[in-house]
Image: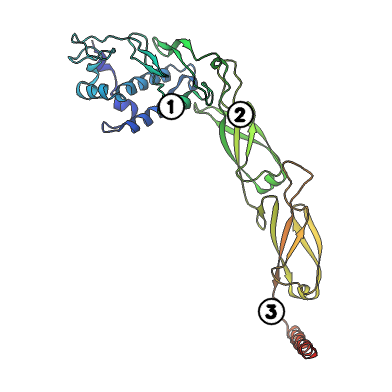
Amino acid sequence: MRTMSQQKRDYYEVLGIDKTADPATIKKAYRKLAKKYHPDSNVGNAAAAEKFKEVNEAYDILSNPEKKKLYDQFGHAAFDGTGAGAYDANGGFNTNGNFNGGFGGFSDGAFHGFGGSGTHTYHFEGGEGDDIFGDIFGNMFGKGKKSRFSGSFHQGGSGFNSYSGGFGADAANEKGSDAQAEINISFDDAAFGADRVITLSGADGSRQNLQVHIPAGIGEGQSIRLKGKGNPGLGSGEAGDLLIKVHVGTRQGYERKGMDVYTNIEVPFTTAVLGGEIIVPTLYGNVSCKLKAGTRCGSKIRLAGRGIVSMKDPKTKGDQYVTIQITVPQNLTEEAKQKLQEFAAACKKDSFNSRHAA
């Protein structure tokens, strides 16, 4: 017949750490595995419940310097009654080699004691340990509130059968914590709004399709809130919300800054000199603009109300700012060159006459 010490896995192997691991590394490994195998995330999964129990048992030993020292020296025999230095849960060592199990209770928000038959210890400590509990149980204790847990978990066979005690008056109906997700959308979807279907993958491998309305005018890094699509609540508490962070793509030829958009347009040399009509593309279609004579390269045109719509007020839109880029004529004919030379000569003559007239 195999003894308990022969059946159990090495505690360092359970947590996936080396024997040289420091307390911070041990705690980090425990937090990761406790969240992974927690019964709330693995409902009906007996194997996960057993893993959760194993992880907690390993952490109970390795997080306690005194117990860790004994384990490093005697292995599981230090705690299953088969070794000469068997540990007594009341704080000492049983010279008979028998383990005296028991429940140590609570003090100042800390859960103490090591379980004997059917009762196991789970590490919900005050101070630094609070974030471990919070990560595993979400908002079960409420934000900014000191909650007291009175009772213990009982395990028999495989999985959790029951727990005794409670989490205080309000804890039975706590709202679930909010969940986070991200989505990539196009420039136009952000500018005009759209309806999209996104697929979310759960920790258990499940997939869920959700219809998401993207409001017109949403910007990079802003979030869409889907009420009641977050983590489930405790008891009859409502589910948390899902916050979807938006990443907006680019559109060639357009730059967005808040509600305003910026574009460039190339204008022929002759139009810039003589003035004339130009066609400017916008998000809402082409717009005809009159360019005054003598327009310089780099000049800007403001098209009011041709920018991005406001999320708060659909009647309000930003502006579009158009920068003029003057194109220089290429591959001129001899006749065209002659005309330009005559034009240049006329400009010099006008400039000379203007200076002397002054």
Who's the residue at 61% across and 30% down the image?
209
Query: Residue 64, image x and y in percent?
Result: 30, 23
Nearer-N-terminus badge (1/2): 1
Amino acid type assigned to the residue bearing label 1 in the image: Ile
What residue is disc 2 on?
A: 241
**Chain-order first, disc 1 or disc 3:** 1
Mark 2 and mark 3 lie on one chain; the one further toward the N terminus is 2
Task: Please rate how many residues cluster around mark 1, counting C-alpha atoms within 10 Å: few if below 14, some from 14 to 19, many from 20.
Answer: many
Residue for badge 1:
132
Amino acid marked by disc 2: Asp
**Considering depth in this image, is 2 or 4 the residue closer to the camera?**
4
Give the quarter of the image for residue 22: top left
For marks 2 and 3, give the CA distance.
63 Å
Please name whichever residue, 116 or 325, is drawn nearer the observer in this view of the structure.
116
Q: Position of residue 291 (x, y in %)?
A: 80, 68
Q: Which residue corresponds to the image point at 59% horizontal and 29% vertical from the top-left? A: 208
Q: Which mark is residue 331?
A: 3
**Closer to the camera in the image, 133 or 71:** 133
Foreground: disc 1 or disc 2:
1
Determine the secondary structure under disc 3: loop
Taking 113 as reference, is 344 above or below it?
below
- Looking at the rendered structure, the secondary structure element under dot 1 is helix
* Image-based side of 112 in relation to 299, left or right: left
Inspect the image, locate mark 3, and give the three-letter code of the amino acid beneath it: Asn
